Every structure is written in C-alpha cells, then in structure tokens.
Amino acid sequence: MSTVIESARSERLTIAGLLSQIRSWPTTYLATSFLTVVAVIAYAFLATPVYRGTVKMMPRESGNAGGALQSILGQFGGLASLAGISFGSVDEQESIAWLKSRALFTVFAEEQNLMPILFRDQWDAASRRWRADLKTPPTMDDAWAAFDGGIRRVNDDPKTRLITLQITWKDRRQAADWANELVRLANEGLRQRALRESATSVASLEEELSHTDAVELRQSIYKLMEVQLNRSVLAKARRDYALTVLDPAVVPDARRFVSPPRFLMLVISVPLGLFLGVCAVLAAQFASELAGQMRRLRS
C-alpha cells in the first residue's frame, strides 16, 4: 500500500505524469470538469440575489451648545455632580455603539416583526406560528446572531467622521427600508434619552433650589437649569438628534445585487472545473491502484 501512495505522489509532482493520468481517465476528467462548470454557472444564475441598502451619515456637531455646556460644567461642575446632573452630549463613539447594540436591535425586531422574516423557512404563514415539526423554534438570540453576523454592518472613517450603515438582504426594498428605519430608531432612542436626562436634571435642580436661600447658589442653579432646558429644546426640535443623514438608503435596481457575483463566478468556473477534473482523475487513479493492490494481497 505504501508503494501505491509513493507512486501516486511522484506522478502528481510532474506535469507529464498528470497528463498521462488524464489520458488514462478522459471520461472522469471531462465529466467532472463539465459538471463543475455547469454547477457554478447554474448557481450564479439561480441563486437568490442579495441586495444592499446603505445609509451615510455624520455625527451631529454640538456647536455653540457644546461649548456652553463645557463652560457651565467648568464653573458649576461640583454642584452639577452633587445634583446628579448629566451634561453629556452624544458623541460619535456612543452613536456607533448604539447603532450596533442589541438593545436597538430588539426594538427594531419587535417593530418590524423580524422573526418570521429572518426564519421564513421555519415559519408557517397559514397558521401564523412556527412549524409543528420543529424541535426548537428560533429565538431572539438566533435572530440577533444572524442580524449582527451578516445582515447589518456599521463602518466609520476616523478621518472624515463618515458613518456608513449597510443592510444586506435578499429583498431589495426591505434592505433599503430597514437601513433607513434603523437610523431613525437610533436617533429617536438617543433623543428620548436626552429628554429623560434633561427632565431628571431639571427636577433635581428644582429640588436643590427649594433648599437654598443663598443668592449666588440660586443663580448657579438657574444657569444649570437654563442649560438643561436648552438641551431639551434642541432634542425636541431635531429629528436627526445625534446622526445627520447625508445619503439615505434607496431601493437598488433589481440587477444591482451584491451576491452572487455572477461575472466572477463565470470567470472562475472553467479554471475551477479543470482543477477539480484533475483532482477527480488523481482520486480515481489512486483508488484503482489501491483496489488492485488489495486484490493482490487477498490472492
């Protein structure tokens, strides 16, 4: 048996040996090559196209409001800390983290009813429930793994500060709609959080105000309340509170899919077929020699 293995290895190392084996097994070589090419081309044209919806955005500049916050924080930071007041505006990294968060995905999944869409093959549309033959129906953990693993992608460019959110999905309209809706929900979530923080801060300041009669301290509290009220007004007025959408997602044309890459698959189909044909010939030659060796050993 070792002789057979060494013989096969030595023939595989030379082009002349490969050509000789191909001539010995022409049917195997041609059939494997042809079937490989046909299979690759068939997949390229029959596979379900996958589309991509893309939203381009930038973190909103805080502008003069941010400078005012820092100035007030420097003057009255101790009082603000004592009252448990938050001055923080949403920064770029926080926005990106929120876009990637499971908490945002949970809100999005419930709003869009994603579970039956993501796991359509396991969903019984007629009875509106998971198929009865499933031992373990999909869970939200499965949906999160699928969504975070390949459907949603967030990229940011530190130089340009451009943030790109991409949704890759087989329905081109859903891909665009999901991308736009996810950004809208992210802005809305951050905006509502800012409103809640401002309301809490104002309530804390009013409580502090009711317990002090010092004129200077009361003036400081009023200034802090003014900052929080300004922050609340901005949050109410800005639809794109944290992320300014520069280029919303649009529904791509039916022919502009990202997968399968048909041209690339057509290019590689022939070389791949020839390579697998050689592999099939080598495997057939090795199996033939091995079978002959086994017959000789039995006799």
Image: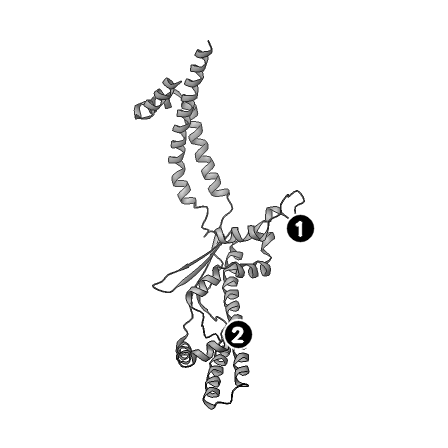
Residue 12 at what x, y percent from top left?
34, 25
203 to the left or right of 6 = right
Q: Please name whichever residue, 161 or 120, is drawn nearer the observer in this view of the structure.
A: 161
Residue 293 at least partly seen? yes
Precedes in sequence: disc 1 or disc 2: 1
Left or right: where 267 falls relative to 51: left
Q: Amino acid at mark 2?
A: Leu
Q: Which residue is mark 1?
A: 129
Q: Quadrant of residue 65?
A: bottom left
The answer for how far apart the CA atoms under marks 1 and 2 are is: 38 Å
- Residue sticking out furthest to the top: 299
Q: Nearer the observer, disc 1 or disc 2?
A: 2
Of the pair 276 and 65, the residue shown nearer to us: 65
Give the image's coloring scheme: one colour
Residue picked out by circle 2: 195
Q: Which mark is residue 225?
A: none
Residue 225 position, x and y percent, is: 49, 82
Residue placed most toward the observer, 165 or 206: 206
Rendered image quadrant of residue 13 = top left
Q: Residue at x 51, y 46 (%)?
A: 48
Q: Count neighbours of disc 2 (C-alpha within 10 A) and say few if under 14, some if 14 to 19, many if 20 or more.
A: many
At horizontal 42% and vertical 41% (from top left) the residue drawn is 265
* Residue 8, quarter of the rendered image: top left
Picture quarter with the N terminus: top left
